[in-house]
Structures are given as C-alpha cells and as structure tokens.
Image (cartoon, rainbow, N blue to C red):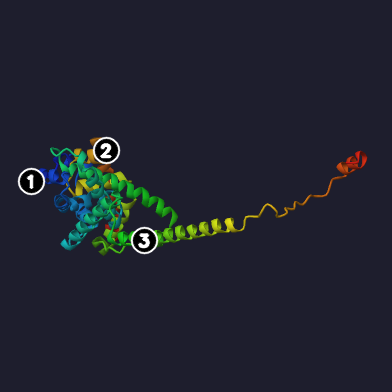
Amino acid sequence: MSDAEGMRGPALVRDDELTHHLRAIVAPPADPGYWDALERRIMARIERGQDEGRWWVLSPRAYQIGLVAAGLTLILAGSVYLRSRAVDARMAYESVIETPGVDTPVFARRGPLDERRATLRAATGH
Amino acid sequence: MTDRPADERDLVLAAQRGRQEAFSELVRRHQRRAYVVARSIVVNHEDAEDAVQEAFLHAYKAIDRFLPDQAFGAWLHRIVANAALDVTRRRKVRDADELPETVSSPFRDPAEAGELRQRLREALETLPARQRSVIVLHDVEGFKHAEIGKLLDIPEGTARSDLHYARAQLRRVLGDVRSGL
C-alpha cells in the first residue's frame, strides 16, 4: 500500500489475501496487443468525431453521389425549361391563328328565370 | 503517484496545437490507468472499455481548456470517472429493459477460475458503487485517500470510511467461503 494512513487502526488493516484476489478480479488485460488495439480504436473514434463535427468535409463517395445528383438535376431542369418554352410558343401561335373574328356570332347561354322575376316580367310586360 | 514524465507537458502542448500523434502518445501512456479507474466504477470489462473510449474522446475535445502545468493524469482520471458513472447510469436503464440472460460477457475474467473469486466478484458487484470504487482504487491501484477524494468528488474521510466498510464486507465473504470449503 502506498499510504501509511491506510494501515492505521483495526478498521483499515489491509488484508493481503483480499487484495490479491481483488487484483485478479479487476486486473486489466495483460496482453500488449489489447492495448495497441484499444489505442487504435480510441484514435479512430477521435478522427470520426472530428469529421462529424466538420459538416463541410465530404467523403469521396459523397462527392461522387453529389456530382451525379447535381448533373441529373441540371438535365431535368434543362428539359423542363425547353418543354415549357415549346408549349409557350405553340400557345402563342394558336392564339394568333384561332382568335375569333368580329363577325363570328357569340352566343351566351342564359339560365332559366326564377319564379319571382318571371312573375314580374309577366306583370310589367318587359 | 507520478503520472507526469518530463516530456508530458510537451505532448499536451503539441496535442493542443492539433498534433494527433502527440495525443495518441498520451493515450498510450494513460489508457491502462484510465481503464483501472473506470473498472473500479463499472462492474464489467466492456463497460470499462466504453468509459475509457468516451473519456479520451471527451479529453481530446476539451484539451484546449486544460492547463499544461497541471497533472494530465489527474485531469484525465476525473474525466474517466465521470464517463464511467455515465456508463453505469446508462447500464442501469438498459438492464431495466432487458432480461438478465441477455447481458453477456465475451471477455473471460481471470477471476472466474475459483469459487472463492467468483463469490468475491459477486460481493464486489453488490457493494455500493462508491465503496467498490474506493477499495479498488486504494487496494488494487494504490491511490491515496486524498486522490480518491478528488477523483470521486468526496471528502477524504468518506473515502476512508468507505474503504473500511468495503473491506469488512469482502472479508466477511472471504471468511464464509473459507469456512465452507
């Protein structure tokens, strides 16, 4: 024991056999390979933790996926733009050639008169 | 307890400048003691290992706030103790949701060899967490009462009385087993 205070009084008398068994129970692994592996795992976790903190750091795979997605989006946006331009042009053309002339009769359909207005019309003659 | 070789301060300063190999060297030097501190608080190998990893990760993130003239080991051990207590709390929540049979331990503890050690091991696990920590830190690792007090955030006198009760309890188990053998 490193401190003499631990030996003072019957309550704090060290039991060598107990200490011996305790050492065996909580003994850290003795294999040096275990500690090398633990150190590697700790440093790997630290590196992972750093990358998680830096959101702007992307893996090469994420870059590839991002580039493909951006390319597809560009192609899609281009085709939508071209289609909408074609539709606009066709509608403009159709609006010019299909505009009704001044002599073309325009019919407007009227709904049936309601009972009150019909009575009023019959009474006044208009 | 000397945990600060002459060049440890340089390693800390280098780690603070972001040199990972310096921090890696600190891990290499302190991981075994960190494991023992964690193992004194948690009840099995896996949890101790988890606590050590968590603690070093936390220490790395907080190294800028560490004053290089202080003892790195003492600072780290406080972090390890807190990480181990966190692991213990999480373990309690997990165990409440699981059947005891689902908790397995692939690491074979050398103490499982004899009945006496098995009984002692069980008795150690049933000790109040603080008493267990105190007896392991004091008797197995040679920490002084004052160091244990700082580490576990308890008065030195409490560490002393915890040691007394823990030893008495384990000695009783030892006596029972001896008389039964």
| Quadrant position of the C terminus of chain A in the picture | top right
Q: Is B157 on the left or on the right of B72, as rendered?
A: right
Disc on the earlier residue, 1 or 2: 1
How much space separates mark 1 and mark 2, taking CA atoms? 29 Å
Amino acid marked by disc 1:
Asp
Is A41 or A81 nearer to us in this picture? A81
Subunit ID for the residue under disc 1: B
User: Which residue, as the protein is rendered here, is positioned at the far front?
Assistant: A103
**Label number found at residue A71:** 3
Secondary structure state at the residue bearing disc 1: loop
Residue B168 can be seen in this image: no
Residue B173 drawn at (x, y percent): 30, 53
Secondary structure state at the residue bearing disc 3: helix
Q: Quadrant of residue A73?
A: bottom left
Q: Residue at x 52, y 56 (%)?
A: A88
Residue A53 drawn at (x, y percent): 29, 49
Q: Is A71 on the left or on the right of A95, as rendered?
A: left
Residue B39 drawn at (x, y percent): 26, 52
Q: Quadrant of residue A30?
A: bottom left
How much space separates mark 2 and mark 3, taking CA atoms? 59 Å
Subunit ID for the residue under disc 3: A
The crowd level at tag 1 (other Cα within 10 Å; few <14, some 14-19, many 20+) is few
Foreground disc of the pair 1, 3: 3
Circles 2 and 3: CB atoms closer than 8 Å = no
The answer to whether tags 1 and 2 share a subunit is: yes
Amino acid marked by disc 2:
Asp
Amino acid marked by disc 3:
Gly
Circles 1 and 2: CB atoms closer than 8 Å = no
- Would you name the residue on which mark 1 appears? B7
Secondary structure state at the residue bearing disc 2: loop
Is B167 or A26 nearer to us in this picture? A26
- Would you name the residue on which mark 2 appears? B153
